[in-house]
């Protein structure tokens, strides 16, 4: 699966998604894009999944018309995210077009 990490998504997570092609918005030169423009560019470039930590994305964008799946990590803390890698990997592996998932990251 072709995955894009939004700003705020801890890059070390990439190592745990080796079965997928993972790029970051920064690497693509898309750091300054608004969420709507980022989704348009990601879909245009064939990304199937956006991983973000932006909890407001679903309120700011009309996701009903999107083909890209979205996974929201409810933390930016890599040490906390690390403790939940199996759940994160399972959700990402099972993501389908247009799906939206929020993954709680308890302390």
Image (cartoon, helix red, strand yellow):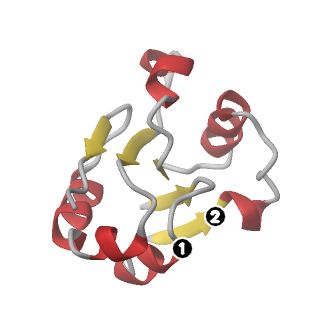
The percent position of residue 34, horizontal first and vertical second, equals 73, 34
Q: Quadrant of residue 15?
A: bottom left
The percent position of residue 50, horizontal first and vertical second, equals 49, 48
Quadrant location, the N terminus: bottom left
Q: In this view of the protein, which residue sits in the foreground, 75 or 3? A: 75
Q: Which residue is mark 1?
A: 11
Q: Which residue is mark 2?
A: 24
Q: Quadrant of residue 96?
A: top left
> Element under label 2?
strand
Q: Contact (CB < 8 A) between labels 2 and 1?
A: yes
Crowd band around label 2 with a 10 angstrom C-alpha radius: few (<14), some (14–19), many (20+): many
Q: Quadrant of residue 106?
A: bottom left
For marks 2 and 1, the one nearer the N-term is 1
Q: Is residue 81 left or right of residue 60?
A: left
The percent position of residue 24, horizontal first and vertical second, equals 63, 64
Instruction: Give the alpha-carbon distance from disc 2 to disc 1, as whole Å.
Output: 8 Å
Question: Comparing marks 2 and 1, which lies closer to the viewer?
Answer: 1
Q: Is residue 13 left or right of residue 86?
A: right
């Amino acid at each position: 699966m072709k995955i894009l990490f939004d700003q705020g998504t801890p890059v070390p997570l990439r190592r745990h998604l080796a079965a997928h092609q993972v790029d970051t918005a920064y690497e693509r030169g898309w750091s300054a894009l608004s969420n709507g423009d980022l989704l348009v560019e990601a879909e245009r470039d064939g990304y199937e999944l956006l991983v973000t930590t932006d909890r407001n994305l679903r309120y700011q964008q009309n996701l009903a018309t999107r083909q890209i799946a979205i996974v929201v990590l409810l933390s930016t803390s890599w040490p906390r995210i690390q403790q939940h890698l199996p759940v994160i990997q399972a959700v990402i592996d099972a993501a389908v077009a247009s799906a939206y998932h929020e993954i709680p990251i308890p302390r």
